[in-house]
Image (cartoon, rainbow, N blue to C red):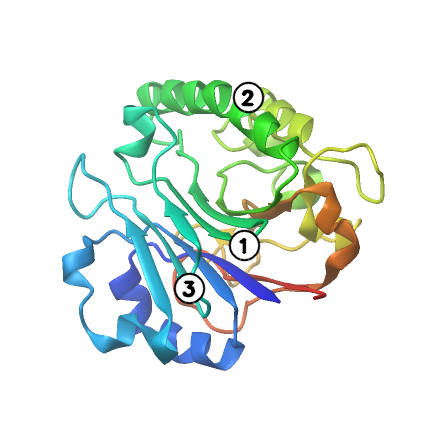
Amino acid sequence: MRIISFNANGIRSAASKGFFDWLREQKADVTCIQETKAQEDQLTDPMFKPDRHHCFYKDATTKKGYSGVAIYSRREPDEVRTALGWAPFDDEGRYIEARFGNLSVVSFYIPSGSSGDLRQGFKFEVMDWLRPILDKWLNSGRDYVLCGDWNIVRSALDIRNWKSNQKNSGCLPAEREWLNGLCANAGSNDGAWVDTYRELNPEGQDYTWWSNRGAARAKDVGWRIDYQLVTPGLRQRLEACAIERERQFSDHAPYIVDYRN
């Protein structure tokens, strides 16, 4: 089973850069997209339904052309959910979940706080509100794959300029403490969420996002903020992962994980 997570920073923009041609080559079972920046009725072109995928969207209702998440799947899900019960989060189009038997695949887009104190405050509210939901899922008996742009790094291994970003959103100590509090240590069996990349690459220093300024991508001055977190029962099914660096579809790179059947 192959699952891809990708922040498109505008799905129509990513399409114009060849994303869907690349996606066809990947033979992914499920693809989770964040920041579609479109309304579903703007995505009627056949290119947005590659290889007869089942396509599901949760658009932002607060303003058009903002946020938005999607799931594309080869198999039709048993159920699709698009709300967690808190309007400030749900209405920004930040969550969609597809259920296949006992497996849930979620496309998440956690807010960024980089635009200022107001949005950083909202980000902290989201984190506090999400924690019990994530704890409930962890202990539900279901298998979960949480894909998405979490807008938080975990450690110095996940960001090129560690020291200079300690006061910047995405690398704040309180953010890292929250995310690390969710995640298991690589190779451990402590019953927490498993960071698939870190499990497969305990000392890896790869990134999934680069600023558009200062030739950051060319210099590989990046951040690892796109994840697939899984419930402990999926740990033994992790086979391989990859970050698509060669093709540039947005300021993020697609993150690919292969799971044993």
Q: Tell me residue 196's x, y (percent).
A: 68, 50
| Residue on which disc 1 sits | 208
Q: Which amino acid type corresponds to the residue marked 3 in the rendered image?
A: Glu
Say few, some or many: other residues with alpha carbon within 10 Å of mark 2 (under 14 / 14 to 19 / 20 or more): few
| Residue on which disc 3 sits | 76
Q: Tell me residue 45's x, y (percent).
A: 19, 73
**Distance of mark 3 from mark 1, alpha carbons?**
29 Å
Say which quadrant the C terminus sits in: bottom right
User: Of tags 1 and 2, which is closer to the observer?
Assistant: 2
Mark 2: which secondary structure?
Answer: helix
Q: Which amino acid type corresponds to the residue marked 2 in the rendered image?
A: Pro
Say which quadrant the N terminus sits in: bottom right
**Distance of mark 1 from mark 2, alpha carbons?**
27 Å
Q: Which amino acid type corresponds to the residue marked 1 in the rendered image?
A: Thr
Left or right, residue 6 beside residue 92: right
Left or right, residue 242 beside residue 97: right
Q: Tell me residue 143's x, y (percent).
A: 63, 46
**Distance of mark 2 from mark 3, alpha carbons?**
29 Å
